[in-house]
Image (tube, helix red, strand yellow):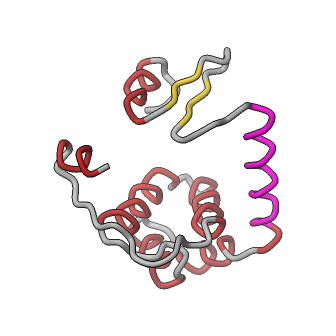
Amino acid sequence: VTRLTKYYDLALRWPSGDDPDWAIPHCAWLHAQAQGRGVPFALALYAARFSRGEDVANPDVLGRVAEAAGLDPTPLLAAAHDEAGQAALTERIRGDFEQRDIFGVPLFIAPRGSRFWGHDRIDWAIGAGLIS
């Protein structure tokens, strides 16, 4: 990670403390995606976590990330903390891991089943039209 951030000239600040409750930012992203702002939200969330070392499950941090992505923080925070949504997300992830044999991230699966796993394969996934 350190070598990659130097290579791409990115800021890196390792988060301190325990890992956040990852269901919270993931449910927030689902809300952002439904609003058509998934990519800007993901980029702002990444910057908060890995460039500034912030706790991305903290409501204040998520609110700032939402605003940076052009989203209203109030409904995003409600979606992020919705217990039913978190439970559904957990089951969806477990099902995907088991049914699709997912073994790590990032992993992109083409409609015909080709797999592109790892940071070094992102360019290949883009070339295959899986992401843009």
Query: Which corner quadrant holds the C terminus?
Result: top left
Left or right: residue 85 versus residue 23 is right
For the point 46% across and 33% down, the residue is 118
Q: How many badges with numbers are in the image?
A: 0
Q: Position of residue 24 (x, y in %)?
A: 63, 70
Q: Where is residue 33 in the image (x, y as percent from the top left)?
A: 58, 53
Furthest-bottom residue in this view: 60
Instruction: Compare residues 99 and 32 and report the one nearer the observer.
Output: 99
Main SS of the magenta part reads helix
Quarter of the figure with residue 112: top right
Q: Where is residue 109 in the image (x, y as percent from the top left)?
A: 61, 26
Instruction: Compare residues 107 and 30 and report the one nearer the observer.
Output: 107
Left or right: residue 20 versus residue 9 is right
For the point 40% across and 36% down, the residue is 119
Magenta residues (range): 85-100
Left or right: residue 16 versus residue 81 is left
Left or right: residue 3 versus residue 41 is left
For the point 79% across and 74% down, the residue is 83
Q: Where is residue 124 in the image (x, y as percent from the top left)?
A: 42, 21
Quarter of the figure with residue 25: bottom right
Please determine whether, in this image, residue 102 is positioned above or below residue 109.
below
Q: Decide whether residue 33 is among the magenta residues.
A: no
Quarter of the figure with residue 4: top left
For the point 61% across and 77% down, the residue is 77
